[in-house]
Image: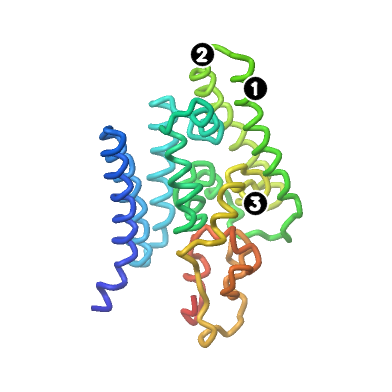
Amino acid sequence: MKTLKQYLAPVICLAVFETVAVVLWLTKDNIFYLINFSYIGVAIALGIFLFIRKNKYARRIAQLLVGTYMLVYLGLICNENMQIEGFWYYLFTGVFEAATIHYAVAKIFGPLIFGRGWCGYACWTAMVLDFLPYKVPSQPRKKIGWIRYITFAASLVFVAALFLAHVGNIERIMFFAFIIGNIVYYGVGIALAFIFKDNRAFCKYICPITVFLKPMSYFALVRVKCDKDKCISCGKCKKVCPMDVDVTDNSRKRKNGTECILCMECVKNCPKDAL
């Protein structure tokens, strides 16, 4: 019975994504949504299953499966701008499709359930950055997180300007914006990783998506919690956390609590299984 219970998490994950897939398929009358969200659900559930089986590449497998699918298939092949500019584009056109559905599920309402799990298991930018050598930050966190609000506003102003100027062929512009935007994200992300010796520097200071993710993640149902009776305050969890989260504090006001990406490095490295 205990063995079966430990696999409940991937089953629940798959069930949630399948529910979203079926609902969107029926309401939008488009089988693509059934295939799309079923695939993502299976990929993430597989990652969780492999983690339970103690596979050290579990999260990375899910991250690569989802990230490359969204970057290559949805972005480059289907010509959909899945960056934040695409969200603004569909929002201004009043169409609940592609990027708006993606953002609603993964980055606006989804975080109420899984917090910033998107950043750990699906982001195609972080997917590349996580290959870099600085998996654990070696320097104190910088107080420049305000830059994310500038990039967030810039993306909104960019798309709004296109509509206000009545620019033609905006869909094509959105596709090129997706390509150029990704090149810039990767370039800046890699540069910051080496400058700050921190793979996740881009996520902490620049990424505009966190403006959506952070407030919703505060209420996340899925969280890493600490069993105070088992914890020996060795500090290993804090040392291995790529996002500088204090997981020993169970309150929602814990340090950098809304930035937990559920990478489970703290869980894997806890010597007393207190997390």
Most extreme residue toward the top is: 168
Q: Name the residue: 58% across, 66% down.
A: 240
Q: Name the residue: 65% across, 59% down.
A: 137
Report whether 188 appears left or right of 6: right
| Front-most of residues 236 and 39 | 39
Element on which disc 3 rests? helix
Q: Which residue is mark 2?
A: 169
| Front-most of residues 78 and 159 | 159
Counting residues from the N terminus, which is met first, the one under dot 2 or under dot 1? 1
- Place residue 84 in its image quadrant: top right
- Tell me the tag on residue 161: 1
Where residue 123 sits: x, y (%)?
A: 49, 45
Q: Name the residue: 76% across, 54% down.
A: 143
CA distance separating discs 2 and 3: 34 Å
Mark 2 or 1, which is nearer the eye? Answer: 1
Q: Amino acid at mark 3?
A: Lys
Q: Amino acid at mark 2?
A: Asn
Most extreme residue toward the right is: 143
Element on which disc 2 rests? loop
Report whether 179 appears left or right of 140: left
Q: Which residue is mark 3?
A: 204
Where residue 120 sits: x, y (%)?
A: 49, 53
Where residue 40 sits: x, y (%)?
A: 35, 46
Mark 2 or 3, which is nearer the eye? Answer: 2
- Place residue 246 in its image quadrant: bottom right
